[in-house]
Image: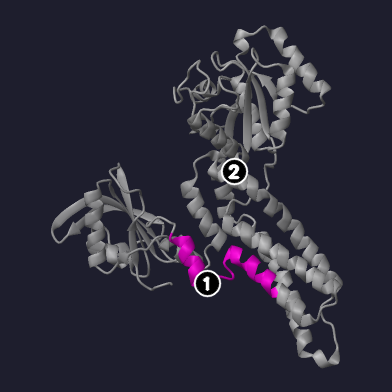
Amino acid sequence: MMTPNTIVALATAQGVGAIGVIRLSGSDAIQITGKVFKGKNLEKQKSHTIHYGHIIDGEKIIDEVMVSIFRAPKSFTTEDVVEISCHGSPFIAEQILRLLIQNGARSAKPGEFTLRAFMHGRIDLSQAEAVADLIASNSSASLDLALKQMRGGFSHDLKILRTELVNFASLIELELDFGEEDVEFADRKKLIELIDTIQSKLNPLIESFKLGNVIKHGVNTVIAGKPNAGKSTLLNALLNEERAIVSEIPGTTRDTIEEVLNINGIQFRFIDTAGIRSTEDVIEKLGVEKTMEKLKQSSIYIYLFDVNSTTPQELVKEIHELELLGFNGIIAGNKIDKANWKATAPFYKVIEESKKNLPHLLFISSNTHYNLPLLKENLYRLATANLQPDATVVTNTRHYEALVKANTALNEVKAGINNQNTGELVALDIKRALEYLGEISGEVTNEEILGTIFSKFCIGK
C-alpha cells in the first residue's frame, strides 16, 4: 500500500477561510516546494523552521505564504514534511496544489499521511484510528478519550502482555519439535496465570465499550410520560428554544423529536416522544409504538409525570412497567409551580413504602425552569457513573470485537490445558488469541483492514 511518491493535499477544511494549509510528505517534499517558492533556499534550511516568501508560477506570483519544514525522521510521517500556509481562498489553494503536482508530487489518498506514520512505526494502528476520532470529537469527553488513545491508550499494555504470550507460544512450538521425547518446556500453570493476568486487563476494557460508545456518539436520553405531562415543554426548556410544539391538547406530539445538548462535556441526544397511553387514533398509536421502541434503545430515561394529575399509586405502577424495560434514569414530577409543595410528600411516602429505590426522584417546573440545573446534574452523573478519571475506555467497535474474540480464544486455551489437550491444539488457540490482540495495534493486519480504516479519513490527514 505504501508508495515512494511525495504526496500533497489540503490539510485544512474545504471552503473559504482566513488561511489554508497545504501539506506535502515524502523524500522530495522540500525539493518540490523549493521549485515554486521564492524566498530562502528551502533545501538549505534546518528542520522545524518557518520561512516567508511567495509561491510563483514562472514569473507570476500566486500567493504570499509561510512555509514550515520538518525533516525526517522528526515529523508526523517520519518523512520530510512541508506545510504551506496560504490565504484561505479555494482558488489559491487549487492553484498551489496544481503547481506542486506539476513539479512531481501526487494527490494524497484519504488518510495517507496517517497511514505513512503507521507504516513507518511512528504510531500503532489504534493510535492512527484515534487521530480520526480526535478530528470527529464533538465534546470534551470524546476529545479526552481520543487524546488518551492517540498517546498510546491501552495498546501499550496489551503489547507487553502479548509479547509474554508469544514467548509461551514459542516454548510450546519447541515442544512439538521434540514430540517423540515427551518433554514440556512451557509451564502450563504459569501459562494459565499469564492468561488470567491478560484477561484481568481485557475484561474491564470490554466492559468499558458501552460507556465509550455513549461518550463518542452521545447519550440517547428519552423523555417519556403520559400525554400532557409537559415533555415538549421540558425539551424546549433544556434547549432554551422553541423546538417542539407545545399544546394543552393531549397527544400533540405524534412523532419523536431529537436534539443534542452538551452537559459538562457530554453530548446528550434528547428524544421527545409521544405520550404513553391507550388510544384509538391510528397516527397517535404509531407514535406510542415508536416511543416504546426508543425507550428500549435509550441509555437514560427521563420519566415525566404531572404532580397535579398523577396519584402516588399510579406512579408506582408506571415505574414498575418501566422497570420491565430495564429502567435507568430519572423520575421527574413536573408542573410543581402549579402545585402545593405538600403534594410532593405522598409520593415520597408511597415510594418508600413500596420499597422502590429511586435516588433520582425530583420535582421540576418546565415553565419556570425550577430544578432544571439539578436535572442536568443528575443526568451527567448517570451518564458518567462508571467513568473513572484515569480509566482507559474503549470507543472503537473494531477494538471491542477484537478484544471479545481474544478473550474467547484465551478461555479456549485454558480449557484446552485443563482438558490436557495436545500442545499442537493449545498452540493453535494461543495463535488465534495473538492474532486478535495484534489486530488492535496493527502488529497483525492486512490490506483490507487498512483500506477500510484509512478510507474514512479526510484527504489531508
Q: Which residue is mark 2?
A: 214
Q: Is residue 35 magenta?
A: no
163, above or below 58, in the image: below
Q: Residue sitting at 62 percent across and 68 percent down?
A: 438
Badge 2: few (under 14), some or many (20 or more) residues near its Cα, within 10 Å? some
Q: Residue sitting at 67 percent across and 6 percent down?
A: 340
Quadrant that contains the N terminus? bottom left
Determine which quarter of the picture holds residue 443: bottom right
Name the magenta segment's main secondary structure. helix
Q: Residue sitting at 85 percent across and 92 percent down?
A: 181
Determine which quarter of the picture holds residue 267: top right
Q: Is residue 110 left or right of residue 133?
A: left
Q: Which residue is mark 1?
A: 446
Please give the range of residues in magenta.
431-455
Identify which amino acid the numbered label 2 is placed on.
Val
Looking at the image, which residue sits at the far front? Answer: 280
